[in-house]
Amino acid sequence: LVRLRARLARSQNSLGKGLLTLLSREHLDEDTWEEIEDTLLTADVGVAPTQELVERLRERVKVLGTRTPEQLRTLLREELLLLVGTEFDRAVKTESGLETPAVVMVVGVNGTGKTTTTGKLARVLVADGRSVVLGAADTFRAAAADQLQTWGERVGARTVRGPEAGDPASVAFDSVKEGIAEGADVVLIDTAGRLHTKTGLMDELGKVKRVVEKHGPLDEVLLVLDATTGQNGLVQARVFAEVVDITGIVLTKLDGTAKGGIVVAVQRELGVPVKLVGLGEGPDDLAPFEPEAFVDALIG
Ligand code: GDP
């Protein structure tokens, strides 16, 4: 965790540091406020949240009068925390509360890190003493099932897969069936994310969801977004949200971008919290999203 925090800090602290430097200027003129806005927009915070934050900062700085570095840091920390939101329940639901396993479906566009995230999540759960079944319902990307199975073997989770280019819903159905038969705690289902047509995606994910629900409730639908894709990620998020009820967001590749503001933008867009972040390609590089740690990483 310490290592992950350090990595998060390395990739993110230019935003907070930039803001602190600007806020410390002797004269906070209009140009400076514009620079502050630009800094936030460049970090993908989004237009509305940027405007709100700047308005609040202006107000609070005015009330403050003199500005010591410590005061500014505290003020910025509070305001960024407010923006990121501390009110959400960010725990991934991995207990069904029933006799049957919790079922978590992982969705997102190919290449965002869906399969890797599913594998990493399995690893965390197994390390925590939970038994996991993996469902390789991404039957369209030829290597996806192999990749998932490799993760499964590495972490000690059985992988249920179907024939190549087979029916994703049938793999999803079988994986939950297997999970129930084995008395597993959690079933993680990796899905295909072809965005070529919305109806295609809708049909496919809708069907996966319906067959899973024949066994019982779907506990969590995690949308995986690549943090480096910025506004494009938001467009993807919107499409997926129209198709399935997203319950949490996983933001991957935060190690490769300083544009952590996307956390704020995507939560706003979907009204659901970022629950996990990916901070690298390695097996341990998945972390719960903690607003305090994130904001501290921003401010440095
Ligand atoms: P999928 O098509 O969505 O299943 O994507 P994959 O899981 O195959 O991941 C695509 C690429 O992104 C792979 O090379 C992963 O190693 C890489 N990747 C996934 N998550 C992260 C992350 O958090 N950070 C970095 N740097 N790379 C990641």
Image: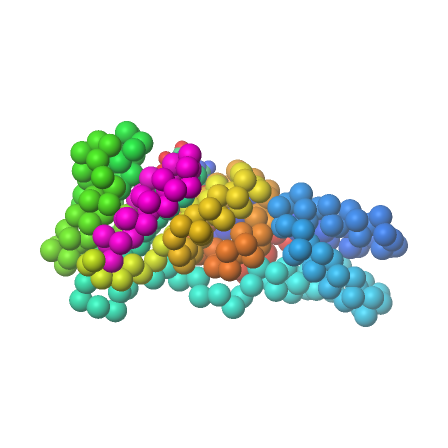
Q: Residue at x 48, y 65 (%)?
A: 88
Question: Is residue 149 among what the camera can see?
Answer: no
- Quadrant position of residue 97: bottom left
**Residue 171 horizontal side relative to residue 205, left or right:** left
Q: Residue at x 61, y 60 (%)?
A: 83
Foreground residue among 14 and 95: 95
User: Is residue 199 rendered magenta in the image?
Assistant: yes
**Residue 126 horizontal side relative to residue 240, left or right:** left
Numbered marks: total: 0
Q: Residue at x 57, y 41 (%)?
A: 230
Relative to 190, is 52 above or below?
below
Applied colour scheme: rainbow
Label the magenta part by its dominant secondary structure: helix
Relative to 109, is 238 above or below?
below
Q: Residue furthest front?
A: 199
- Quadrant position of residue 78: bottom right
Question: Is residue 242 among what the camera can see?
Answer: yes
Quadrant holding ligand 1? top left
Foreground residue among 177 and 203: 203
User: Is residue 41 rendered magenta in the image?
Assistant: no
**Residue 155 horizontal side relative to residue 10, left or right:** left
Q: Residue furthest left?
A: 181
Q: Residue furthest top?
A: 142
Q: Residue at x 58, y 42 (%)?
A: 231
| Residue 143 x/y as whole percent | 28, 30
| Residue 275 x/y as whole percent | 44, 56
| Residue 28 x/y as whole percent | 85, 55
| Residue 30 x/y as whole percent | 85, 52
Q: Which residues are magenta?
A: 190-213
Foreground residue among 160 and 214: 214
